[in-house]
Amino acid sequence: MNLIKITLLLVISTSVNAQFLNQKLLTVNGLSFISTKEQIIEEFGIPDRTFEPNYECGFLSSEEQGKEFHSLEYSGIKFTGNQYDNYLIEELDLTKNSSIQLNYGEISLNTIPTIEELAKILGLESEIESPTDTMLRAYFGKSDDAVFFIFKNGRLIKLDYWSPC
């Protein structure tokens, strides 16, 4: 009985590990998914808007994490973080800014024509939300946070960061 449990655990953990997104390979305009405020400003300039997001819960919640978070908002992209943890890409909307280049390693994700192709590149499974909108969720390593790649009419339009409450 214990051998069956161990085998089942190994199979499950192996398949789950194959579902993880390598955060270090995900970049926007050459910036890492997590970057310093200085790097972001160097690449994108002064933010259009800076504010405290005041989330109730999650990894970007000032109250829950015990430290302040700030968002740097630009046309089509929002970074959220602080000076201690740096800033991550919280939202990316490719329909609002055509100069944004989203890459996974050397592969441009802006030009991926289908969610199935993206899933194959990332080694992930897709989750169909509706006939016209498709979403692919990708977790980072052994963390509970993830990003959603959102397709509409066969085109990648958005990336959203998510953390559990």
Image (cartoon, rainbow, N blue to C red):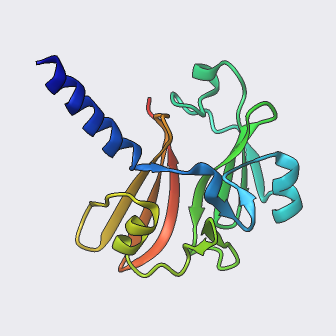
* Residue 132 picture location, percent across and down: 29, 74
Q: Relative to residue 142, is residue 17 depicted above or below? A: below
Quarter in which the C terminus is drawn: top left
Quarter in which the N terminus is drawn: top left
At 40% from the left and 70% from the top, the residue drawn is 151
Left or right of residue 114: residue 25:
right
> Is residue 45 visible from the viewing direction of this image?
no
* Residue 140 picture location, percent across and down: 51, 43
At 56% from the left and 76% from the top, the residue drawn is 110
Left or right of residue 57: residue 119:
left
- Please identify the quarter of the rendering in which residue 48 is found: bottom right
Left or right of residue 164: residue 91:
right
At 70% from the left and 34% from the top, the residue drawn is 69
Q: How many marks?
A: 0
Left or right of residue 125: residue 17:
right
At 14% from the left and 26% from the top, the residue drawn is 4
* Residue sitting at the far front: 3
Q: Relative to residue 53, is residue 102 depicted above or below? A: below
* Residue 145 picture location, percent across and down: 49, 39
* Residue 115 picture location, percent across and down: 37, 71
- Please identify the quarter of the rendering in which residue 93 is found: bottom right
> Is residue 136 visible from the viewing direction of this image?
yes
